[in-house]
Amino acid sequence: MELLYAACVGVLVSCGVFLILRSRTFPVVLGLTMLSYAVNLFLFSSGRLSLNSAAVLGYSKDYADPLPQAFVLTAIVIGFAMTAFVVILAIRGRADLGNDHVNGQVPDNKVKGKV
Amino acid sequence: MLDTVILIVFAMIGLSLLLNLWRLLIGPSVPDRILALDTMYINSIALIILYGMSMGTGLYFEAALLIAMLGFVSTVAVCKYLLRGDIIE
Amino acid sequence: MTEWIISILLLIGGSFVLVGSIGLVKMPDFFMRLHGPTKATTLGMASLLTAAMVFFSTAQSGLSVKEILISIFLLLTAPISGYMLIKSAIHHKLDSIERTQGKDNIEDDV
Amino acid sequence: MRLDTRFKWLPTPILSLLLFFVWLLLNNSVSAGHLVLATILALVIPWITSPFRTKQPLVIKPWLAFRHLLLVLYDIITANVQVAILILGPNKKLTPGFVKVPLDLTHSMPITILASTVSLTPGTVSAEVYPWRECFTEGKKPEQRFLLIHVLNLKDEQALIDTIKQRYEAPLKEIFQC
Amino acid sequence: MIEHLTSLPVLLPMLAGVLLLMPPCGKNKSIRRIASVVFSAITFLFSVALLLKVQADGTQVYAIGDWSAPFGIVLVADPLSTLLVCLTTLLSVVCVLYASAGDDEKGSFFHPLVHFLILGVNGAFLTGDAFNLFVFFEVLLIASYALLMHGGDKKNTRAALQYVIMNLVGSAVFLIALGVLYGVLGTLNMADMAQKVTLLQGDDVYLAKIGGLLLLVVFALKGALLPLHLWLPNTYATAMPIVAALFAIMTKVGVYSMMRVYTLIFGDEAGELSHMAQNWLWWLALATIAMGAIGVLASQDLRKLVANLVIVSVGTLVALVAVQTVEASSAAIYYLVHSTLVTAALFILADLIARQRGKVADRITAGTPVSQPMLLGACFIIASVAVIGMPPLSGFIAKVWLLKETLDAEYAMVFWPLYLLASLAVLVGVSKAGSTVFWNHQGKATESARQERVHPAQLVALLILISGAPLMSVFAGPLSEYAIDAATQLHDFEGNINVILVGEQ
Amino acid sequence: MTLLWIPLLSLLGSIISSMTGKLTRNQSTALSMLMPIIALCFTISLAPAVFSGDVIRETISWIPLLGVDIAFRLDGLALLFVFMILGIGILVIFYTRYYLSSKDSMPKLYSYLMLFMTAMLGIVMSNNVIQLWFFWELTSISSFLLISYWWHKSEARKGALMALTITGGGGLALLAGLLLLGNIVGSYNLDVILASREIIQAHDWYEVALILVLLGAFTKSAQFPFHFWLPHAMAAPTPVSAYLHSATMVKAGIFLLARFYPALAGTDIWFILVSITGLTTLLVGAYVALFKHDLKGLLAYSTISHLGLITLLFGLNTELATVAAIFHIINHATFKASLFMATGIIDHETGTRDMRKLNGMWRFMPYTATLAMVAAAAMAGVPLLNGFLSKEMFFAETLHQQLLGSMSWLIPVLATVAGALAVAYSARFIHDVFFNGDPIGLPRQPSEPPRYMRVPIEILVALCLLVGIFPNFVVDDILTAASFAVLGGYVPEFKVALWHGFNLPLLMSGIAVTGGLLIYTQRRYLYQFQASLPPLNAKKAFDNSIYVMIKWCQRKISTIENGSLQRYLMLMFLVVLLAAGWPLFEMSQLAGKKQLTPIDVHNAVGAALLIIGAVCTVIWSRKRVVSLLMLSVVGLMVSVAFTRFSAPDLALTQLTVEVVTIILLMLALFFLPQHSPRESSSMRVLRDLGISSALGVVVASACYALITRPLESISDFFLDNAKTGGGGTNVVNVILVDFRGFDTLGEICVLGIAALGIAKLLVNLPLFMPGSDSEGRPWAKERYPILLASISQSLLPLALLVSFYIFLRGHNLPGGGFIAGLVTAIAFILQYIAHGSNWIAERLTINYRKIIASGIAIALFTGVGSWFFGRSFMTTWFDYFDIPFIGEIELASALVFDLGVYITVVGATLMILASLGKLTANAPKEEVNI
Ligand code: NA
Ligand code: NA
């Protein structure tokens, strides 16, 4: 299971990073969201994986490490605030600049094969 | 026996989820995909409830409850988007 | 005894959920696909939740009935989700299969 | 049809009752503390949310409503078995169709309940309420409304319309007295 | 109150931010301005009080919620962090004062956002917990995002978008780093981490190294170290100048964090991991200086120029951090304060000049003369002399000091020529810019530009900053003692552990 | 009185004169001259002690930790320079009174001049090398200000900039050199450095330090090839040129050579560098001076030449040469300053300095002409004048050296050639200006200047004569004292005399005079030859090189900072890859020793869903809606994973956040274009794929390495103390509101600030609102579907109830303020979706700003509350109360804190959505689809 978990984190990172490297704001925002999923899973796993041991006293024999869970909670909330901001900023950017390119302008050389 | 049954039902839900994913992937239309996603939400409730039962803990009930409530909101929001574009107008 | 009840309820629930998803995949057009998830899945969920209710009521001390709540929620919301979906399908003018009757009952919504 | 309640402090008795029970359900408890809390919530929440409620007809016949609820639940179960069979059977046998059911109900809440019922019961899903609200001002000129439904396996259109009107719409009219 | 002094630099800005959103500050412009200035002044005074206390009684450790380290979050006020807190709060006084002349009304929520930014910066300086550091980083970042858009235009939006996206990625990296470190060390209190690092064995060492290097990436991004500096020039050059002036402290947060992490956690005691980033830091710092110098020469407007000066200062600071000796750190501390004040002053000056030059604004080209050449010119000369590092102002002392302390470093033979050449580039860039802007006149000023006068509030703000350079020079003696004291404590592994974890003074 | 007063008085003078704007010109001048005169008198009072061989010292502690002190010393060399600086300074101030027109600001020039004077005094009196550098750079700054005094003239600006660049660069080299010296001897004290000749010259860094110091000296003293700034500095007012660019500042470099002579000189490398540079400068300066038509240009090059001469003398490494050098410093200062002043008079009276126009001035201003001619004769080295004496000594010294081996004869020959050239340009100065026919097209009718304008020149010319005729009487003391200082306490036998008999130097002088006159008379041929050479314009070359450099920088910057976020991000990801990947390769084994958990089928399904969802989000990223739906699958599966791995709180949070995120992204979908165009080339895609998969692999490996290792963490403390110390059984929640409540406080601040920021972003936002969807379908007619509207109304109370439930139980069971807040917010968002923002606005008049503020305030004040119980911030309190009938209940301050969280979350979330909603509610949708 650990391998599967790590693989999932890796896939999320890859997909997130790939999307972040796109040129339009929407995919970038999607990528950031995806990356934050990956990061949350990663941070969460720093307390190791444990089954049926929620850190609620009296509900199980041994308990998962609660500290990373608290960290991830904070991270999720902060990530949410940041995502909200960047979404609205992207909208603002589109409104101000007339396009949704992350660089604020659509490159002239849209010729294929040219970066 | 219950454990076996739970395993079987797990498999059924797992299969359902895969079927949902299949529909989600092939579409063909956006409403099709939304429908598949909505069903996936509901099937996840089943999954979580089953987890709870297999672990013998009710700690995950609220998660299921929230999926029930919130999956609906997402579905409605996406549909509203398809219909009107602006979801909060 | 309760184990039997729980098992049967679970199996029924699981089957209905599965049937709903099968319908989702199998049916030929969107409108027909909608039926499975709105009905079969909802009932299946109700059955599963009842099983859970019985399970927790017996496994732990005291009655556990809060699972009903999820069922209530689903019963309240599933038709509306279906309604919103079918509205968007109509808006998108999705094709229904040839033999669908009464297509002219649909009004153009724009 | 009545829109206003008897008690100012209890504008929506059914809702309050629902909240009261839901609270107890959520907490799995009928301890004194929760009873008090449930009562308080059942009174306070409707009061807080009252601005967000449009005036709706009141349930005049609660008992009838309860009976109707049981009937619908029964129908849901039977209908689902039927639908399951339809789904698992060969697709070719199915003859889907769209049906327009004329409505006698005028208010949105009863219409919603009817549409939900229809969606949960035999092979039908509510699709649209015609005419759209944008073309129709509530309470002004009660125009004829239709409910568009999609039927999974349509055999007899008129029979279906009659069933819906009699089995589901009529009780609702009575419950809400409209 | 006195026993809670350590928490006040964090709590007061939060309180200020909150109160400024509420009536009567929320509605009334003048009340809001007065309240904001008063609040920032109070925060500054309490920070100074904390500084005095730290000087008198040694490092202060404040356990939030009475949960002692490593379990709870502690605030650690040592000479270095307190100094930076004072600097930050001073900057905030200047900023709100300056903005009260009218800039604050070019968008909503300026004052609360400034206080929230200060909250984040002070928190980052004071916290002794790595995850809490992340939280405060985010506080200051989100506030900076919002402030960046204050009174902005289209260019501004574009820069902000890029800045935000890069920093979001940075935050993700930060979290991964924290995850790795927690996963290896089982703690995120920095002193505790330092202690645990010494006990690492086997492959765990390399996992910790991943965490440490990723943290370095994050701090390098915040601090604008090459090649992660690319966000800075546009961001600072398009932000409203007073905001950019305030941002002068933000890159320093990154550098400060580097100092903390790479002296305490991965410092001398860290065994295999000690000084693991030194080589990286060193070469990146050099490249940053070079890049900044090139940028200074290339700049076509004043704000861009100052932004590049910020990059040079970051490179210089990081080079000093990389030397990792007490002496170099003390030079870094002095240089940090100096460069923050001076670049902030230059941003403000660029703004005042731009206002008085009308259409050409702050572009380095012939244009209409400023309407108050004596005042602005004098201030510009002072700031320039300071930033170039010429006597008699603070820049000269910083330059002498940092050259002296890098002489024995491994790479001095690369650093010295590079740094001196960069200084020359800065000299050429700044003097060329100044003589063009002030002396190369062309065309007539528009009526509105001609009537533009420095507002008294702006003047006071400017003078506070400008006076920093001569004061830091005159009081270089005591300041240098303070810096060395701060650097000594920064490098004192045992002492830090004892104070934070054991609670001994 | 202490030494400090000398520069201090001068500084005081600078400040005083800057404030004389309201006074008359005479008053201003008098006041300005006062301070230097006092300083001069003071210096004179100190002179006897110095002449007797004492060195006066004065130290004030400044930055002891750096070894930087304010330290002054007055020895013979310093005394000589102080006399020159103050003496000529006073004369220049006096002269300036008549030179400046009424348009020019006199206080400003005086102030700058005296600031410069301060700096010069500081240099020559420093006893600490860092302090020396301090004043060294101050001369650069004040010289910049003085050259650009007429800043409206382009050449003044450019000349100032050039001077600053060259001398500033040299200054940096000097600093490096001085720091090295300080490091070698372990002190910045000049006394120590000067006494450490052996240590220094034996040190590995000696050559480097020497070169650096010489760079400083040569740039300042305009030695070849750094000489070109000096002629352009002539854009300054003539008094400034007289003072800075002949008598004092350019001598600072020479002073430096003299100052460090005891420590640095005497080696071959010193000889080679200094003498070759001096010789070259001597010749180049003298040669170029011949061709200058501008009077000041001629004088500038002549200055360069003379500076070269002095440098050469220092390079000759003999004691007598050094004495000669010092002597020539004095002589050059007197005649060159007077020549500049004379030029100033000519310029002042005629309006031009062009020698092609200036002819026959003798007739218009015979008195001035006489003075100028005497000074020029001194410059040429005519007997009876001071220039002759030092030049004789120079010639003599060139003969005595053997350092070029068999080619040593070259030096006297070249020296003679230079002497001839000097005679030639001096002759030109005299003949071309004062005789040579009638003036051509002068702007002004010339006449004698105001009487007192000539006084400074008279004094200086008198000095030339005095020194020339009675050298022993006038300069012996000071020359001895200065030489004593330079030579480190040893003065050779020297005799400054008018007549040494017929000897080789005299012959050389004779050849030089004859040759010079010959060159001048035959200059036509020389001019033709010069004209045939390609023109060499130093200013253009300098400007060009600066321009080229700046263009290069701009190109570099624009290629590096090309505004492409993808580039920046790629760099960042590469750095991350390196940082995280590198240590992975150092590991011996990735997997740890922890017992692994087996995979079960539903986990596999979940993982499959997650992975496929993620991959499809990427694949369909250009079909934005579909991509978003795929992302939802990922989000859902992440929540499911949290439940699976025992994190119910996380699952709840993730779920609620997910919904709000989706809604936000729906908004983005509407306001942003519906599709992403295909923009990336295949190569680009391949590159990105490479980076992203590498990163994925690295992070996954790190993750795997972590979770397969056992962990010892501090968490047991939380598990042990949650109930007893925090009063709750949900440890995660207790951590959030108690152990690490500070994080949570920060977190809600982030949320609140984000909401404020978003509201800020939305002010005056011009939105693109398409009138149809991406496939061109117009939007549906029904804005608020009827069934949705009524069902959402019914859900609201239910959702509030649930959120209250979740809020209340949070401390002991999964839930809490944040989740509850989001549930409430989502319930309201549903109302927005179902009814629109106008409908809400009619019913709910809440200022979200205040809500957020009060939420944070509640949390903050809960924390502060503990102060009143003498505890630190955020110390929580809880207790159990037995209430009759109801039973035991727990009251905890953490609950109030959580309430703050709840309120902030509701406020922030709704503010974000409501602000956008309000903006679009009444705006018409456009019929265009962009
Ligand atoms: Na809207
Ligand atoms: Na999220």
Image (cartoon, coloured by chain):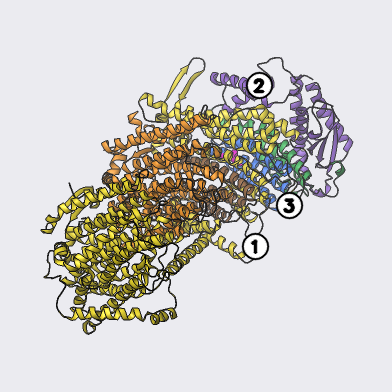
Amino acid identity at mark 1 = Lys
Residue E226 is situated, as x and y percent measured from the top left of the image, at 44, 57
* Contact (Cβ within 8 Å) of mark 1 with mark 2: no
Q: Which residue is mark 1?
A: A110
Q: Determine whether F549 is above or below F874 in the image.
A: below
Report whether F657 appears left or right of F865: right
Name the secondary structure under disc 3: loop
Q: What colour do you see for chain B?
A: blue
Q: Which residue is mark 3?
A: B28
Amino acid identity at mark 2 = Leu
Name the secondary structure under disc 1: loop
The span shown in magenta is B47-51
Q: Which residue is mark 2?
A: D17
Residue E289 is situated, as x and y percent measured from the top left of the image, at 40, 58
Residue D101 magenta: no
Q: What colour do you see for chain E?
A: orange
The purple chain is D
Q: What colour do you see for chain F?
A: yellow
Report whether F926 appears left or right of F693: right
C-alpha separation, residue under disc 3 versus residue under disc 2: 44 Å
